[in-house]
Structures are given as C-alpha cells and as structure tokens.
Image: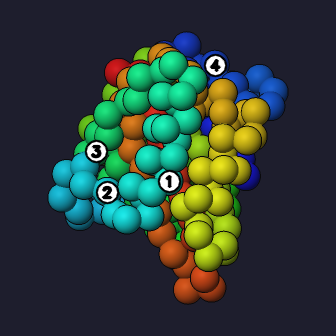
C-alpha cells in the first residue's frame, strides 16, 4: 500500500516524510486518458469499498464526503492504468501522478489526497477497506475532515489483482 496527499497551492506533500511537488502542466498525450463513464455512479466493487470507508468515518463522528463524478473518473483511470500497465504506485511508469491529471478531469482544489490498494482476495473490497483504514497513513487521509468530495475507482487486472484508488479533494 502507498499514500499520497498533496497541498495543491503551496506545494507541500505529506506522506511518510515531507517532499516537494511541482504542479507542472499536463504533458500532451498523457498515458492515462479520461474514462468514458456516466456521472458518479459507482460499480459494485467501488460501492462496497466506499461503503466501508463511509461507515468507519460515520462511526468516528465525521461526515461522509459525497462522491464526485469527475473525481471518480480520475480514480477509475488511475486504477485501470495500474491494472493495464502492471505497476502499483502513485506515479505511472512515465511519471504521471493524480495531481498531474486533475486538470484534465476539471478537478481543482486546495488539498487532495490519493490512497491506493491492491489485493487478490475473494472479498477484495472488504480487504481493501480494511487495509486502508488500518494503515495510519491511509487513515490520516481518508479521515481528514478537510476533504469534502471523493472519487473511487476499481480495476481488475488480467492477473487477477484488484486495484482500488480513492481520491479525496478539498475544493
């Protein structure tokens, strides 16, 4: 598992340590194209992982960010790219991150975070949610009350690995 949270204005990046991010313009012909999918309707796997995260947030006394269509399309594209190109990370093999792709999807904000999880469990969404919630770094992102919209993506690789991406944004 890995985490990625970035301040979009102010270039502060919080992960296990402090790094600096430059928000360079999106390269022409980026590897992760927008996904053609209707609005914010979630697939069964996406709905299952988000329901568990939402329940945990509610149990912690936090509101649940609504699912945003464009953020979901980006999360789906990130998961699909990892499944198709057989990698697991916040940067694609050509160096693109979700932050680089946000403008392509019309997403702007003050703060954004990405959590990713991969597994091959029979109940993949339950394992993804359990692992993300149990991880202190992922928990910090998913339970940060500053994030007010979310997007969830899932893709199944040809090798049977499930890739989950949750992106949260403070507009």
Disc 2 crowd rating (10 Å Cα; few below 14, some 14-19, many 20+) is many
The residue carrying mark 2 is 42
Q: Are circles 1 and 4 on residues that touch, CB within 8 Å?
A: no
The mark that comes first in sequence, 2 or 4, is: 4
Classify 97 as above or below 113: below
The mark that comes first in sequence, 3 or 2, is: 2
Q: Are circles 4 and 3 on residues that touch, CB within 8 Å?
A: no
Classify 153 as above or below 4: below
Q: Are circles 2 and 1 on residues that touch, CB within 8 Å?
A: no
Q: Is residue 90 left or right of residue 101?
A: right
Disc 1 crowd rating (10 Å Cα; few below 14, some 14-19, many 20+) is many
The residue carrying mark 3 is 70
Q: Quadrant of residue 119?
A: bottom right
Distance from label 1 to label 4 (Cα)? 28 Å
Disc 3 crowd rating (10 Å Cα; few below 14, some 14-19, many 20+) is many
The residue carrying mark 4 is 12
x then y, percent, for residue 33: 35, 61
Which numbered circle lies on residue 49? 1
Q: Residue at x 44, y 47 (%)?
A: 51
């Amino acid at each position: 598992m890995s985490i990625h949270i970035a301040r979009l204005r102010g270039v502060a990046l919080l992960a296990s340590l402090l790094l600096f991010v430059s928000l360079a313009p999106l390269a022409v012909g980026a590897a992760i194209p927008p996904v053609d999918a209707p609005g914010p309707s979630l697939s069964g796997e996406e709905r299952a992982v988000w329901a568990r995260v939402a329940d945990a947030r509610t149990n912690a006394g936090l509101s649940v960010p609504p699912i945003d269509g464009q953020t979901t399309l980006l999360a789906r594209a990130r998961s699909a790219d990892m499944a198709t190109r057989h990698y697991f990370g916040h940067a694609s093999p050509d160096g693109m991150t979700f932050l680089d792709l946000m403008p392509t999807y019309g997403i702007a904000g003050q703060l954004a975070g990405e959590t990713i999880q991969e597994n091959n469990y029979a109940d993949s969404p339950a394992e993804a949610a359990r692992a993300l919630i149990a991880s202190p770094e992922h928990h910090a992102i998913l339970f940060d009350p500053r994030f007010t919209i979310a997007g969830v993506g899932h893709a199944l690789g040809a090798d049977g690995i499930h890739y989950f991406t949750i992106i949260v944004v403070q507009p």
